[in-house]
Image: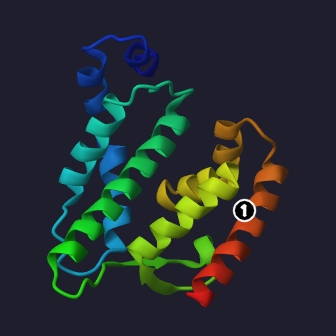
Amino acid sequence: MLLHAMRDGDSSAAGRLLPLVYAELRALASRRLRDQRVGHTLQPTALVHEAFLKLVHQPDGAWNDRAHFFAVAASAMRSILADHARRRAAAKRGGGSERIGLDEAAVGTSTEYDVLQIDELLQQLAQVDPMKHKIVEMRFFAGMTLEEIADVLSVSKTTIESEWRATRAWLAVKLKDA
């Protein structure tokens, strides 16, 4: 498997992997960018390439399987979008940030939120409960099903359902307070 070859240091594995996963990564990037403001300067192709470079250069690039790889890719894309929003806000006089839509699957509402606000909340969540943080990234940013998340995290679907309900409630409260 190419993912294991990459982990084991095969320098040519990344070049062989990209064509195999490119379409799915591009679809993931398109979903993420669809939630961004109109006229967003980062295009899906650029987001895919930046995320893939992050993945290839990770020192701990030990992916268990395909689902785990895409979960990590989604996390990389979220990080890139947040960094992009920070740079854009810093470049604008008076700040301002980009917006991201969180649909009902994420927090039970269809409201737009500041991408930096979401990133900050996810960083807080990672400190408090890393599992819930991973669930949000996989569910919202990678579009994974609860079953897929359970497989990646090696826990039961029931556990993921319970954690997901609690996480959605936590996000809803935090976003409402903000």
Q: Is the N terminus in the top left, top right, bottom left or bottom right quadrant?
A: top left
Work out whether 18 lies above or below 16.
below
Residue at 77% over, 67% down: 166
Q: Position of residue 132 (x, y in %)?
A: 68, 56
Q: Which residue is mark 1?
A: 164
Residue 107 can be seen, yes or no: yes
Residue at 46% over, 75% down: 117
Q: Nearer the viewer, residue 165 or 116?
A: 116
Q: Position of residue 44 (x, y in %)?
A: 23, 57
**127 horizontally vs 50: left or right:** right
Residue at 31% over, 55% down: 80
Image quadrant assignment for residue 127: bottom right
Image quadrant assignment for residue 108: bottom right
Residue 30 can be seen, yes or no: no
Image quadrant assignment for residue 128: bottom right
* Residue type, label 1: Trp
